[in-house]
Structure formats: C-alpha cells, structure tokens
Amino acid sequence: MTKKTATKDNKQPEKQGGDKPAQHMDDGSAELQSERIAKRMARAGLCSRREAEKWILAGRVRVNNKLLETPAFTVTDRDKVEVDGKVIARKERTRLWLFHKPAGTVTTNQDPEGRKTIYDNLPEDLPRLVSVGRLDINTEGLLLMTNDGGLSRVLELPSTGWLRRYRVRVHGRVKQEELDELQNGIAVEGILYGSIEARIEHEQGTNAWLSVSLREGKNREIKKVFGHLGLEVTRLIRISFGPFQLGDQPAGTIREIRSRMLRDQLGEKLIEQSGADFEAPIINLAPEVARSASKAAEQGKKQSRTDGRKPREKQKRGTVRDDTLSRLTTSKGGKNTGRPGAAGDSAGRGKSRSGKPQRRKSR
C-alpha cells in the first residue's frame, strides 16, 4: 500500500496542473508556493474564480507564453500569466481601502448604459481594486475596496457576520413598534430577509431619518423591506461595514487601512478563509489622499489666505521695520510736530502703535 500511495502522490502534480515538479522548485531544494490559476486571477482582482475558468476555456489565458486549455492548472510566482495579452502582476500584499461612494455612480468596471462608475472617481495610480459587495446607483456611503479578490469574496458573505449600518431617510408615516417587528425577519415577495434593527432618529412631518443595522445585505434589501411597510426611501447612506467607519470622509475620496490594523480587524479565521497574504511585498504604493473633510477644509483655508499674497519676511531680532518708523512722530513743548492725531495735538488724543485712536478713560 505504501508503494501505491507513493506512486499516486507522485502523479498528483501532473494531474492537477500538468506541471513538472522541477517547475515548482527553487534551486532544486525549496518548494515554491503554488496555487490554482483561477485563484491567481481572482486575487489579482480580474474576476471571480468561476469567471476565470470561463476565460481559460475561451482561450484568453496564457502561462509562460503557452495557451492554457484547462483551469486545472497550478502556477507559482515564477510563472508568467497573461490574460488577453496583458501580464498579471506578481503577488502583492493584501490591502484594503475605504471609499466614500457618491450617489449616482455604478459599482462596476464598465456600464453598458454609459453611466458614471465608481472607478471614474479613483486615482489612476492605485492598483487594480475590486469592491466588497455592491451599492445601488443612488446609494451612497462606505464601500470597501481591496486588491485581493479572495478577501472581497469572504467579506461580502453573510456568514462572515459583519454588521452593516445605514442612515435612511424615508417618506411616510412609521411607528417604532412596526420597526421593532423587523428584528424577527420578514418575507417580501417570496424572499425571506433576516433580522433588521431599525429605530427612528428624527421625524419632521411625513419625513423621518432612521438608523438601520443588518448583516445580510441582499440586493436592494432596505428599499424593498421599507417599501413593504409603505415607506419610500429617499436617501440611503452606509456609514459602517464591520469594524470600519465612514466618519467625516468626503464623498468621492478613498483612504487605505494600515496593514497591521487590517490584520487585527480580520483575525486569523478570516485571514485563513480568504487566503489573505500580509507577507508579500507592496508593489504599487499609492500616495496619501485627503483623510477627512475637516482636514481638507483647513488646508483649503490656509491656501486661500496665502494665494495672491507675498510671504511675510522673517524679521531679525533687534531691528525695526521701515513702515513702522514712518508712523512715529515726536513732540516738543506740547506742540505737534507730526501728522494730525499725533501725541500733543489739541484734542488731547493720541494714537496707539497700530495707528488706531486711543479712547480716553473715564474717571
């Protein structure tokens, strides 16, 4: 049995990918880490693993300048992978960004209707990113973006259990008792939605702002559930996704989460499930982007104050400016020897160093 098992194990690499064992060896001794070609393509953010398999069967993928005919193929960092004639970048460290999606943008790479997409707002020097789930065209707020397709797939699963919080503006009459019933789940048009926590924040006439929390995030879930209650959703903002908060980040901006913080927030379980890699190098390091509205506004004010003005020269200690000397006057014998309003004039008033009239103190 030992001999048969060994023979079977020796043939296994050829069965999976058709590669020779020597292709996965470093200097003939250390084994290189290998992964399925579909996983490599998904991790690069090109597509999902299922789509990658279709691309391979369609003849769009080459490995080491040879056309790949089957998705049952493993590659290493040494292998050159091309999709539609373009080389896939080598493995990069798993990274995550927080993007404030503006309303009126579509969460897709290309829209057949020609509408503006989220990628139209992203800086060109960022690596290729995929979104964690989607937000409807009129929904705004926090959208997680990553360069790791495996991480994106895991985080968007309801089984991950990350809470998603929204601020929702609705039109219509609503009672808190009705909203409390949503915690037990609700069926709308044959679709069962899980527990939803909702509370009224503010009411004004027939309009109200609600705070809504859920974990599933099915397609158009909030609009369909509240529509079932007779409410029209007029504005929908996602303010948090799991441990990540939108805060005061301006619409249309993106900021990256530090690797250490990301690793701590994911935990070992999600890291293992997603196959996230925090040991690989950072290939494309993007510059810093404005992190908050207050900081951006402060920078704008400073810029407006300096625009069109010459920078003030730093004055040496012990020296006097010429314009200051010109404002000084002297008097002798109580007569005014300077301009009107100087010390010793008939009005008995003088001027301060700044040139403003001094008020006489009442006794």
Image: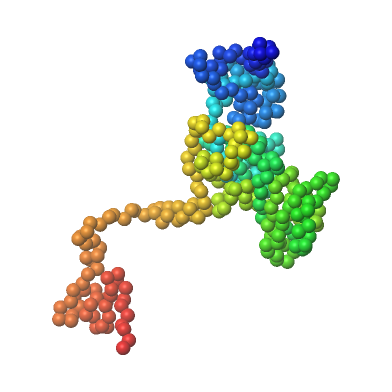
Q: Where on the picture, by quarter, is residue 150?
A: top right
- Between 182 and 130, the one lying in front of the other is 182
Q: Residue at x 66, y 36 (%)?
A: 153
| Residue 269 to residue 54: above or below | below
List the single residue furthest toward the left. 333
Question: Horizontal placement of 288 versus 252: left or right?
Answer: left
Q: Residue at x 78, y 57 (%)?
A: 181
Count of picture labels: 0
The percent position of residue 174, horizontal first and vertical second, equals 77, 62
Q: Is residue 10 visible?
A: yes
Q: Is residue 141 visible?
A: no
The percent position of residue 177, horizontal first and vertical second, equals 77, 62
Question: Horizontal placement of 232 versus 348: left or right?
Answer: right
| Residue 6 to residue 249: above or below | above
Q: Where on the picture, by quarter, is residue 198?
A: bottom right
- Between 151 and 237, the one lying in front of the other is 151
The percent position of residue 207, horizontal first and vertical second, equals 72, 62
The percent position of residue 83, horizontal first and vertical second, equals 62, 23
| Residue 237 to residue 93: above or below | below
